[in-house]
Amino acid sequence: MPLVVPVGAVNNLPMEYIYLDHNATTPTRPEVVEAIARCYREGHANAASQHRAGQRAQRILEEARESIGENLGASVGGAVPDRILFTSGGTEANNLAVLGLARSRPDAPPGQLIVSAIEHPSVIGPAERLLEEGWRLDTLGVTASGTVRVDQLPPLLTPQTRLVSVMLGNHETGVLQPVADLAALANDAGVPMHTDAVQVVGKRPVHFRSLGVAAMSVAAHKFQGPAGIGVLIVRAGTPLLPLQLGGHQQHGLRPGTEPLALAVGMATALRLCCQEQHERAQRMERLLSRLENGLRAGYPRLVINGVDAQRLPQTTNIAFPGHDGQMLLLALDLAGIACSVGAACSSGSAELSPTLRAMGLPKAVVSSSLRFSLGPTNTEAEIDEAVCRILHVLHALDGSSAG
């Protein structure tokens, strides 16, 4: 690969790194950092302890739990509220949902699990573990635009179906999925449905009860909260088998000392982003359009994957046919642009994107695709500079190839 001249030097500007990988993680908000620091400064006791200091910590923890539930449309009041289980993040929440819901009848023989072809590795992994244990695993396909095909679900539902799991928004393309429609079909068949909402919460309004699902996974670091914490929301009355044992916390469904400061940080981040959500989404849409239109104007042969579907307001997946996506990623990194070839959890894999392959896209498109995901810290000036740098790298590589 030829040495790429940093674009900042071309524009006579100091080259500052431009972060366009917010789907991997987001920078933590200062207000969240302060809320977490305040908890640590106050030196709270273990929320599971029975003394007064422990009871005070428990009250703070429950306030954070209820705030998260209210902002996500869960039922937090009444005699039998929905359960909001703190986890270490989205991956654990997805594992607990898939394995805990599927195995909720431990005396029953292995059954059937249905997932989509575009799920995150943290759903595919536990699904494949069940397959190894003798379960049947069926997969819902997607359209060329990356939308899960609702029509494929009814024929697959049987008396042996134990769980359906389909993400709310795709981590690579940003394409939003018809989860409410799928959940209605699953509920009619008496089958619980789980959705991985990790990429959608904080970017679009999400209402757990309105979706009709039995469980939903969320991760705080995707919306400027702290890494290391997430939640699995489980509808009241839904049976769940724990993956871990040895503690009474969270009704024994996810034992272990609950991270009070991280819970407060997550609740703070979610509350703030929900307050700003409408304005932020509009701003992200404008910035994303600016990025896509600028790149298209300077490089007309690019392909925007999933462009015909409803997408997250800040995610685009763009193919640059004729280039290798991994090599282009490295070249852009040298030019001060952070982006991704797919999910951060699978970025070390040489395998071509399962999401793009499931969409039936040509190999030349799949192998040359990059994900750009924007966030609230990005500015118009950054997007314009990013367009300039990306085009500079593309044309430099094209010139080298032509030579």
Image: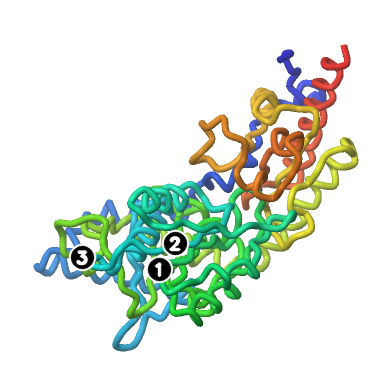
Counting every numbered tag in the picture gives 3
Disc 3 and disc 1: Cα gap in Å?
Answer: 22 Å
Q: Nearer the viewer, residue 281 or 206?
A: 206
In the rendered structure, the answer to whether residue 110 lies left or right of residue 373 reads: left
Mark in front: 2 vs 3: 2
Q: Name which quarter of the figure residue 65 lies in.
A: bottom left
The residue at which mark 3 appears reads as 252
Upstream in sequence: badge 2 or badge 1: 2
* Dot label at residue 381: none
Where does residue 237 sit, x and y in percent of width and height? 33, 80
Q: Are marks 2 and 1 in contact (CB under 8 Å)?
A: yes
Q: Tell which of 94 and 107 is nearer to you.
A: 107
The residue singled out by tag 2 in the image is 113
User: In this image, 327 relative to 221: left or right?
Assistant: right
Query: Seen in the image, is 43 located left or right of residue 190?
Result: left
Quarter the N terminus occupies = top right
Q: Quadrant of residue 253?
A: bottom left
At label 1, which amino acid type do we have? Arg
Q: Is residue 135 left or right of residue 14?
A: left
- Looking at the image, which residue is at 71% across and 27% down? 324
Amino acid type of the residue tagged 2 in the rendering: Leu
Picture quarter with the C terminus: top right
Question: Residue at the spot x=48%, y=79% of the render?
Answer: 189
Dot 2 falls on a residue whose secondary structure is strand
Using the image, determine if residue 303 lies above or below residue 17.
below
Q: Amino acid at mark 3?
A: Gly
Q: Which residue is mark 1?
A: 162
Q: CA distance from mark 2 to mark 1?
A: 6 Å
On the question of residue 265 being in view, the answer is no
Does the rendering let one see residue 182? yes
